[in-house]
Image (cartoon, rainbow, N blue to C red):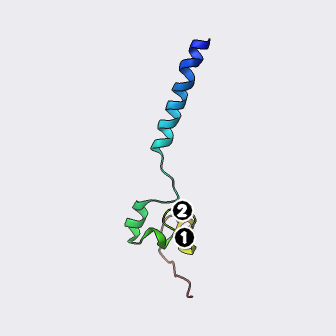
Amino acid sequence: MLTILKTAIPATIMIAGCFLANISPTYASVKYAKTEGKSCTYCHVTASKSELNAAGQYYAAHDHSLKGYVPAKD
């Protein structure tokens, strides 16, 4: 029983690690920036964080499209 646990636990950890390494966060993607022709900070407060500004919230709510988005006037 102990031998099984000694191999099963590391194997489980490795499989989970491989799975997590292959998924990407959905909150930011260079693909979206290229598709829209905008920089990451057009939709994000900062490029390295997931926090969205008004444009990003619109983009997320409208099936990843900026069609119809009108930026608020300052």
Disc 1 and disc 2 in contact, CB within 8 angstroms: yes
Image quarter (top left, top right, bottom left or bottom right) of the C terminus: bottom right
Q: CA distance from mark 1 to mark 2?
A: 7 Å
Residue 23 — which label?
none
- Residue labelled with disc 2: 49
- Residue labelled with disc 1: 45
Tell me what residue is drawn at x 47 percent, y 42 percent: 21
Residue 65 screen position, x and y as percent: 48, 68
Horizontally, residue 67 falls left or right of residue 57, namely left
Of residues 67 and 45, which is closer to you in this image? 45
Residue 25 screen position, x and y as percent: 51, 53
Residue 2 screen position, x and y as percent: 61, 13
- Above or below for 49 versus 15: below
Disc 1 residue crowd, few under 14, some 14–19, many 20+, Cα 10 Å: some
Tell me what residue is drawn at x 53 percent, y 19 percent: 7
Q: Quadrant of residue 6?
A: top right
Tell me what residue is drawn at x 57 percent, y 15 percent: 4
Q: Residue furthest bottom?
A: 74
Q: Residue furthest right?
A: 1
* Numbered disc 2: secondary structure: loop
Q: Amino acid at mark 1?
A: Val
* Numbered disc 1: secondary structure: loop
Q: How many marks?
A: 2
Q: Amino acid at mark 2?
A: Lys
Of residues 71 and 5, which is closer to you in this image? 5
- Above or below for 39 versus 74: above
Image quarter (top left, top right, bottom left or bottom right) of the N terminus: top right
Residue 18 screen position, x and y as percent: 47, 36
Disc 2 residue crowd, few under 14, some 14–19, many 20+, Cα 10 Å: few
